[in-house]
């Protein structure tokens, strides 16, 4: 059974120093395009921490949002990161959660004019990196609660969600009324600097548990066979997160060097907003997202039962 409180076997991974483990090449799939949310991994790569530990870590950009989770479970790669929502929106036997390294506010970026139309009973069209099933249902629930809190009637048929990739602001400029699965530290900053007239409707604004974060994952088999490697990688990611929290200027320098991009005011602002949201140490903690699972299970939106949720952390 999954714990109702903190996991009694929660692990705080060490931050330094790390013993050299068996030499190994590792791949870690991101959840989508490379961005400063991934600085906890990038820092260790750029500063040679993995090399010093006998590891070579490669970050992979997926074609599809869920590719990394599937490849991790199948054993094609060792690690993936993705939002904790995807621990419960489908049953993925063999997936193991290792801890959170980043948490932000997230939700729907909605053009202000479209928001008014929605409150008046009209329809809105949302762009999303992924569409269908549980993900769509959560977006509809957020907008339903938002309307109700402003005294407006709401019907699920007022919301149309289309899969349109990760470029949220480009999608809004192209004519979509809103974008779903936006992060405050990225699209929120981008919209503010662009002067976009839009609502950022975060999950916490409507009484829903946050899930806009990145959790580190591996497979049951890899964890069993390479527990020392898993502990080292998780520890180094936590160390990277702490470095970026402590020294955002160094984090920015690391980002530009690794990404091969030129500094811009927008990216400087995104990095400055992101660094305080990084989480260290990386800790296996079933309690962190238990409230999310419990709320979505109560709403009929979780595809994973209590036992399935608990298995992610055992």
Image (spheres, rainbow, N blue to C red):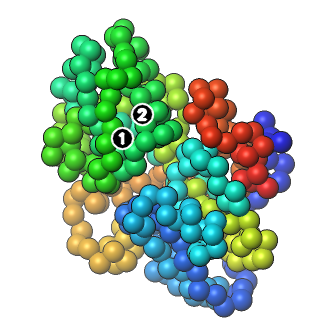
Where 172 falls versus 206 (above or below)? Answer: below
Where 145 falls versus 15 (above or below)? Answer: above
Where residue 228 appears, x then y in whole percent?
75, 76
Where residue 67 appears, x then y in whole percent?
49, 64
Report the residue marked by disc 1: 180
Badge 2 or badge 1: first in the primary sequence: 2
**Quadrant of res 299:** top right
Q: Foreground residue, 67 or 34?
A: 67
**Residues under numbered marks 2 and 1 in contact, where contact means CB atoms less than 8 Å apart:** yes
For the N terminus, the image quarter is top right
Where 30 falls versus 299 (above or below)? Answer: below
Where residue 216 appears, x then y in whole percent?
60, 61
Q: Which mark is residue 226?
A: none
For the C terminus, the image quarter is bottom right
- Residue drawn at x 72%, y 39% as measured from the top left: 305
- Residue drawn at x 39%, y 23% as measured from the top left: 156
Q: Residues within 10 Å of mark 2 (few under 14, many from 20)?
A: many
Report the residue marked by disc 2: 139
């Amino acid at each position: 059974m999954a714990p109702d409180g903190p996991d009694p076997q929660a692990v705080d991974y060490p931050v330094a120093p790390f013993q050299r483990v068996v030499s190994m090449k590792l791949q870690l799939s991101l959840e989508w395009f490379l961005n400063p949310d991934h600085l906890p991994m990038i820092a260790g790569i750029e500063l040679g921490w993995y090399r010093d530990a006998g590891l070579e870590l490669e970050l992979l950009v997926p074609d599809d949002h869920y590719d990394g989770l599937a490849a991790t479970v199948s054993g094609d790669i060792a690690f993936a990161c993705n939002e904790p929502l995807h621990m419960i929106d489908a049953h993925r036997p063999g997936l193991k959660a290792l801890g959170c390294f980043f948490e932000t506010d997230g939700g729907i970026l909605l053009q202000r004019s479209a928001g008014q139309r929605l409150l008046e009973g009209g329809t809105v069209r949302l762009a999303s990196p992924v569409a269908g099933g549980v993900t769509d249902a959560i977006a509809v629930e957020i907008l339903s609660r938002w309307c109700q809190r402003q005294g407006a009637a709401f019907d699920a048929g007022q919301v149309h969600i289309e899969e349109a990739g990760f470029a949220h602001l480009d999608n809004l400029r192209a004519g979509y009324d809103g974008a779903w699965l936006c992060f405050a530290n990225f699209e929120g900053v981008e919209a503010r600097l662009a002067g976009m007239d839009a609502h950022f409707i975060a999950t916490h604004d409507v009484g829903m548990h946050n899930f806009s974060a990145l959790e580190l994952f591996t497979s049951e088999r890899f964890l069993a066979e390479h527990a020392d490697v898993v502990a080292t990688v998780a520890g180094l990611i936590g160390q990277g997160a702490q470095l970026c929290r402590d020294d955002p200027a160094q984090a920015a320098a690391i980002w530009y060097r690794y990404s091969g991009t030129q500094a811009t005011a927008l990216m400087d602002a995104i990095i400055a907003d992101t660094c305080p949201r990084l989480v260290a140490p990386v800790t296996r903690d079933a309690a962190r997202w238990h409230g999310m699972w419990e709320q979505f299970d109560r709403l009929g939106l979780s595809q994973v039962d209590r036992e399935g949720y608990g298995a992610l952390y055992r």
